[in-house]
Image (cartoon, grey):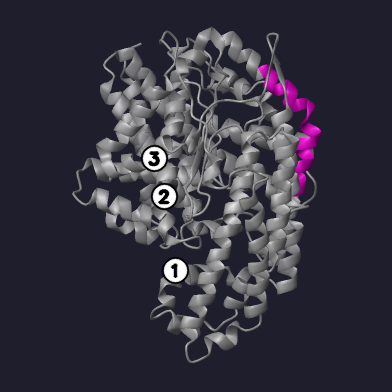
Amino acid sequence: MPNGFGREKPVHAKAGESGAEKMLGLLPEWQLSDLYPGMDSAAYKTDLAEVERESAAFAARYRGHLASLAGGAEGGKALFEAVQEYERIEDRLGRIISYAGLIYATDTTKPVHGKFYSDAQERVTTISSDLLFFTLELNRLDDSLIDTLCASAPLNHYTPWLKDLRQDKPYQLEDRIEQVFHEKSVTGRGAWNRLFDETMASLRFEIDGETLTLEPTLGRLQDTDGKKRKSAGEALAKTLTENLRLFTLITNTLAKDKEISDRWRGFQDVADSRHLANRVEREVVDAMVSAIEAAHPRLSHRYYALKAKWFGQKTLEFWDRNAPLPKVEQRTIPWEEARDTVLEAYAGFSPELAGIARRFFDEKWIDAPVRPGKAPGAFAHPTVPSSHPYVMVNYLGKPRDVMTLAHELGHGVHQVLAGPNGALMAPTPLTLAETASVFGEMLTFRKILAETTDKAQRKALLASKVEDMINTVVRQVAFYAFERQVHIERRKGELTTEQLNGIWLDVQSKSLGPSIHLGPGYEVFWAYIPHFIHSPFYVYAYAFGDCLVNSLYGVYQKADPRFVENYFALLKAGGTKHHTELLAPFGLDARDPAFWQIGLSVIDGMITELEGMEG
């Protein structure tokens, strides 16, 4: 799958029922020719051949010579030129694999797409093997020498990247071991990821005489008809159960693969490699998780008890957790209305922000229709700084689809603004990568809420937002707890399906509370979560981002005159600054335990508001 930013969240049934497809209007499909004209194009083949030659030449010129170059009379200039050339090659390789990944996401069931993506992965992995030495040798240079050379131009341009790179130094291995790890990723982790993707895309779910794929089946869990929600929940359980042997094997294999890598590199905790990649301290994550878990009674437990009351029940079945509120009209939102709503919300904050977002619509950087075989969910893929990001959604006109569009466009705008930092410094750690996306959602939600005067609709909007926030904060941290237990137990030996089911039920019951009945079938729902497969421990970044944005939005509401300026500076920084430095202008510090209470209090306050509404 593409290495973009996306999230596991409820998705919706395929349009086509009651003329809904026509109501959506013309949905855009992305124009990937901005990267390459086609899979068989001369431009694609030429880039592959040229970058292969460039990488080999780069290795021949610099391997084993960085120490002497750095110690020379013009060491700073020599290293600058080497890093600059390395960055150009990385950008070209990134363009190739981004294109292949986006082609694959368009239809993961097409054998020609699977082969194209796999072939691209193999070629890029082989080519990039010639580049592995570079960062390893840079990290073997004396720290004081690097500090001296980075103190002046031209190498000071890359100071943030070199400083960041050196955080990996304690965990890097001997060159040939690193090369083996790198090259075997194609037949190891990469192959298991592809097996999961293609298996999920091929699954079919029988619901009331219909045969559906995963995406529309999950969508039925938000249908206004309770019978349809129940049928969807039972169909999900049945098909996932039938394939649990494979999903159990994939989960065990990837957890063991990670354990081997962590052990060789010297990581102590199962999530330490993710914390390092996120450039966030373990203590900060632990403080966030503890704060969220302690808040379960006043957030998720309290809200679901309230929702059960609205439905006239003591408890809700698991398939009703994301059900729309009863007796509230549900309408299909046309694509043009969704586009205008998001752009107007962005423009209300900053015309410049809206202008960047509008390019995604005008220049065909978005793929919106639901198609058989298309990757589920949504993501924003940054591709490379020399090109532009792409956004994928599965749009079906539901209110949450509008929020998803706002979310992914936030990622896209962030990626555009960070792009000038270049291929090495544009990428943002996951803990900050969710900032613009969640902030874009908040802007859109506040706009819609402000324009809604009908009491029932306002209640439904507020409830939907609370559910999204619970899904983003409480649910994602529960996912993190599930992963932690799985990876810790895997160190003792292979886990059975029953063990995985048991861990899942344990963490879900604690997070959702007694008002959600986790009946037979729900125990297998861990099997379809893609983040567990593609990006272990990715999920806590969502909670980090949501709490961060709640705090940021509070600063924004206080009409700080420099807020917009500071916000743009945060997005433009990309991966050049630590979270403490980026949040300081807003008077925020994620290391302070009280910081997390600010974000959680926003959810608490919304639930209190709902409790005060009649009906």
Task: Kindly report which numbered mark, 2 or 1, lies closer to the viewer in this rendering.
Answer: 2
Residue 483 in sight: no
Instruction: Look at 60% across and 42% down and name the residue there.
Output: 102
Residue 235 part of the magenta-drawn span: yes
Residue 221 image point, x, y percent: 57, 19
User: Could you tell me how far apart the alpha carbons at marks 1 and 3 are, in whole angstroms?
Assistant: 30 Å
Segment colored magenta:
234-254
Q: Nearer the viewer, mark 3 or mark 2?
A: 3
Q: Which amino acid type is shown beneath numbered disc 2?
A: Val
Q: What amino acid type is highlighted by mark number 1? A: Pro
Please state, as top left, top right, bottom left or bottom right, where the N terminus lies in the image: top right
- Between 575 and 285, which is closer to the camera in this rendering? 575
SS assignment for the magenta stretch, majority? helix
Precedes in sequence: disc 1 or disc 3: 1
Q: Which mark is residue 160?
A: 1
The local secondary structure at tag 3 comes to: helix
Residue 416's disc number: 2
Taking the spot 37% from the left edge, 27% from the top edge, the residue there is 607
Picture layout, residue 594 above or below residue 80: above
**What residue type is disc 3 on?**
Arg
Q: Using residue 17 as the reference point, say whether residue 257 is left or right of it.
A: right
Cα separation, mark 3 vs mark 2, equals: 10 Å
* Secondary structure beneath label 2: helix
> Badges 3 and 2: C-beta atoms under 8 Å apart?
yes
The residue nearer to you, when weighing 50 against 560, is: 50
Q: Residue tagged by mark 3?
A: 359
Name the one closer to the observer, 99 or 398.
99
Image check: 81 left or right of 57?
left
Q: Is residue 215 above or below residue 245?
A: above
Q: Position of residue 242 (x, y in %)?
A: 79, 26
